Image (spheres, rainbow, N blue to C red):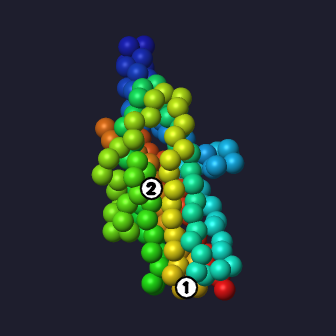
Amino acid sequence: MKKILLLTLLTYFSILGAYAQSLELYTKDGVKLNNGDTIVSVSTDATADLVVGMNVTNSGTSTLNVLAKKTELDIVSGSENYFCWVSCYLPNIFVSPSPFTIAVNDTIKIFSGDYSSNGNVGTSYIRYTFFSQKNVNDSIAFIVKFIARC
Protein backbone atom coordinates (compact mmCIF):
# COMPACT_ATOMS: atom_id res chain seq x y z
CA MET A 1 0.00 0.00 0.00
CA LYS A 2 2.85 2.39 0.87
CA LYS A 3 4.52 1.65 -2.46
CA ILE A 4 1.33 2.49 -4.37
CA LEU A 5 0.91 5.74 -2.45
CA LEU A 6 4.55 6.66 -3.02
CA LEU A 7 4.27 5.86 -6.73
CA THR A 8 1.07 7.91 -6.99
CA LEU A 9 2.68 10.90 -5.28
CA LEU A 10 5.79 10.70 -7.47
CA THR A 11 3.64 10.58 -10.60
CA TYR A 12 1.56 13.53 -9.39
CA PHE A 13 4.59 15.71 -8.68
CA SER A 14 6.23 14.69 -11.95
CA ILE A 15 3.16 15.86 -13.84
CA LEU A 16 3.13 19.12 -11.90
CA GLY A 17 6.81 19.63 -12.67
CA ALA A 18 6.23 19.04 -16.36
CA TYR A 19 3.80 21.97 -16.44
CA ALA A 20 5.72 24.28 -14.14
CA GLN A 21 5.70 27.85 -15.31
CA SER A 22 9.23 29.19 -15.78
CA LEU A 23 8.35 32.64 -17.12
CA GLU A 24 7.33 35.77 -15.25
CA LEU A 25 6.19 39.16 -16.57
CA TYR A 26 7.03 42.56 -15.12
CA THR A 27 5.98 45.99 -16.30
CA LYS A 28 8.69 48.56 -17.01
CA ASP A 29 7.87 49.91 -13.51
CA GLY A 30 8.65 46.52 -11.95
CA VAL A 31 5.08 45.42 -11.23
CA LYS A 32 4.68 41.64 -11.52
CA LEU A 33 1.75 40.48 -13.66
CA ASN A 34 -0.23 37.30 -13.22
CA ASN A 35 -0.89 35.08 -16.20
CA GLY A 36 -3.77 36.59 -18.20
CA ASP A 37 -3.72 40.03 -16.57
CA THR A 38 -4.98 43.00 -18.60
CA ILE A 39 -3.24 46.35 -18.72
CA VAL A 40 -4.62 49.52 -20.30
CA SER A 41 -2.87 51.95 -22.64
CA VAL A 42 -4.80 55.13 -23.49
CA SER A 43 -4.16 57.99 -25.88
CA THR A 44 -6.32 61.11 -26.18
CA ASP A 45 -4.73 61.73 -29.57
CA ALA A 46 -6.11 59.19 -32.04
CA THR A 47 -3.12 59.80 -34.33
CA ALA A 48 -0.52 58.92 -31.67
CA ASP A 49 1.06 55.48 -31.45
CA LEU A 50 0.73 53.50 -28.24
CA VAL A 51 3.62 51.35 -27.04
CA VAL A 52 3.57 48.88 -24.14
CA GLY A 53 6.87 47.45 -22.94
CA MET A 54 7.20 44.30 -20.87
CA ASN A 55 10.08 42.57 -19.11
CA VAL A 56 10.27 38.77 -19.25
CA THR A 57 12.08 36.79 -16.53
CA ASN A 58 13.15 33.15 -16.60
CA SER A 59 12.44 31.95 -13.05
CA GLY A 60 12.97 28.31 -13.98
CA THR A 61 15.92 26.00 -13.46
CA SER A 62 17.30 25.92 -17.01
CA THR A 63 18.01 28.29 -19.87
CA LEU A 64 15.02 28.80 -22.17
CA ASN A 65 14.63 29.74 -25.81
CA VAL A 66 11.53 31.93 -25.69
CA LEU A 67 9.20 32.90 -28.51
CA ALA A 68 6.58 35.65 -28.49
CA LYS A 69 3.12 35.51 -30.03
CA LYS A 70 0.38 38.09 -30.51
CA THR A 71 -3.30 37.26 -30.74
CA GLU A 72 -5.69 39.93 -31.96
CA LEU A 73 -8.77 39.50 -29.76
CA ASP A 74 -10.78 42.53 -30.91
CA ILE A 75 -9.30 45.13 -33.26
CA VAL A 76 -10.56 48.55 -34.37
CA SER A 77 -10.99 48.54 -38.14
CA GLY A 78 -8.22 50.48 -39.88
CA SER A 79 -5.77 50.25 -36.98
CA GLU A 80 -2.40 48.44 -37.15
CA ASN A 81 -0.27 46.68 -34.60
CA TYR A 82 3.05 44.91 -34.45
CA PHE A 83 5.43 43.67 -31.80
CA CYS A 84 9.16 43.64 -31.19
CA TRP A 85 10.97 40.57 -29.80
CA VAL A 86 14.53 40.08 -31.05
CA SER A 87 13.39 42.21 -34.03
CA CYS A 88 10.33 44.26 -34.85
CA TYR A 89 7.90 42.37 -37.05
CA LEU A 90 5.40 43.49 -39.66
CA PRO A 91 1.71 43.57 -38.63
CA ASN A 92 1.02 40.27 -40.44
CA ILE A 93 3.54 38.35 -38.27
CA PHE A 94 1.86 36.72 -35.27
CA VAL A 95 4.67 34.51 -33.88
CA SER A 96 8.29 35.61 -33.65
CA PRO A 97 10.33 33.53 -36.09
CA SER A 98 13.36 33.57 -33.79
CA PRO A 99 13.53 32.80 -30.07
CA PHE A 100 15.43 34.84 -27.53
CA THR A 101 17.59 32.84 -25.14
CA ILE A 102 16.96 33.71 -21.50
CA ALA A 103 19.32 32.36 -18.84
CA VAL A 104 18.09 31.25 -15.41
CA ASN A 105 17.04 34.25 -13.28
CA ASP A 106 17.73 36.64 -16.15
CA THR A 107 15.30 39.39 -17.15
CA ILE A 108 14.97 40.49 -20.76
CA LYS A 109 13.77 44.02 -21.46
CA ILE A 110 13.34 43.91 -25.24
CA PHE A 111 9.60 43.35 -25.76
CA SER A 112 7.17 45.97 -26.97
CA GLY A 113 3.64 45.79 -28.29
CA ASP A 114 3.00 48.71 -30.66
CA TYR A 115 -0.40 49.98 -31.72
CA SER A 116 -1.38 52.65 -34.23
CA SER A 117 -5.04 53.58 -34.46
CA ASN A 118 -4.37 55.49 -37.70
CA GLY A 119 -6.90 58.08 -36.54
CA ASN A 120 -9.60 55.49 -35.82
CA VAL A 121 -11.18 55.99 -32.41
CA GLY A 122 -11.99 52.91 -30.36
CA THR A 123 -10.69 50.08 -28.20
CA SER A 124 -8.60 47.12 -29.34
CA TYR A 125 -7.57 44.07 -27.32
CA ILE A 126 -4.37 42.15 -28.05
CA ARG A 127 -2.97 39.20 -26.09
CA TYR A 128 0.79 38.69 -26.01
CA THR A 129 2.09 35.24 -25.06
CA PHE A 130 5.65 34.19 -24.28
CA PHE A 131 6.47 30.50 -24.41
CA SER A 132 9.35 28.05 -24.33
CA GLN A 133 10.33 26.79 -27.76
CA LYS A 134 10.69 23.27 -26.32
CA ASN A 135 7.49 23.27 -24.26
CA VAL A 136 4.59 25.46 -25.42
CA ASN A 137 2.79 24.69 -22.13
CA ASP A 138 5.51 26.65 -20.33
CA SER A 139 3.99 30.01 -21.15
CA ILE A 140 2.67 33.26 -19.75
CA ALA A 141 0.45 35.89 -21.34
CA PHE A 142 -1.01 39.32 -20.79
CA ILE A 143 -3.65 41.36 -22.59
CA VAL A 144 -3.40 45.00 -23.58
CA LYS A 145 -6.50 47.13 -23.90
CA PHE A 146 -5.44 49.87 -26.34
CA ILE A 147 -7.80 52.87 -26.24
CA ALA A 148 -7.60 55.66 -28.83
CA ARG A 149 -9.74 58.72 -28.12
CA CYS A 150 -10.09 62.15 -29.69
Q: Amino acid at mark 1?
A: Gly
> How many neighbours does mark 1 have within 10 angstroms: few (below 14), some (14-19), or many (20 or more)?
some
- Whether 7 is drawn above or below 18: the answer is above
Q: Residues within 10 Å of mark 2 (few under 14, many from 20)?
A: some
Q: Which residue is mark 2?
A: 84
Q: What kind of element bears circle 1?
A: loop
Instruction: Give left or right: position of 93 versus 83.
Output: left
Q: Which residue is mark 1?
A: 119
Cα separation, mark 1 vs mark 2, equals 22 Å
Q: Nearer the viewer, residue 12 or 33?
A: 33
- On the image, the x and y values in percent for residue 14 come to 39, 27
Vertical position of residue 67 compared to residue 61: above or below:
below
Q: Position of residue 142 (x, y in %)?
A: 53, 56
**Residue plotted at (36% across, 65% down):** 90
Quarter of the figure with residue 16: top left
Task: Evaluate whether residue 13 shows in this view.
Answer: no
Mark 1 or 2 closer to N-term? 2
149 sits to left or right of 63: right
> Position of 128 compared to 41: left or right?
left
Quarter of the image where one finds residue 101:
top left
- Residue at the extreme top of the image, as rendered: 2
Image quadrant holding the N terminus, namely top left
Q: Position of residue 82 (x, y in %)?
A: 43, 65
Q: How many marks on residues?
A: 2
- Classify mark 2: helix, strand or loop: strand
| Residue drawn at (40%, 48%) of the image | 86
Quadrant (top left, top right, bottom left, bottom right) of the C terminus: bottom right
The one nearer the camera, 65 or 84, is 84
Q: Residue at x 64, y 45 (%)?
A: 32
Residue 69 marker: none
Among the 4 quarters of the image, the one containing residue 36: bottom right
Q: Nearer the viewer, residue 49 or 30?
A: 49
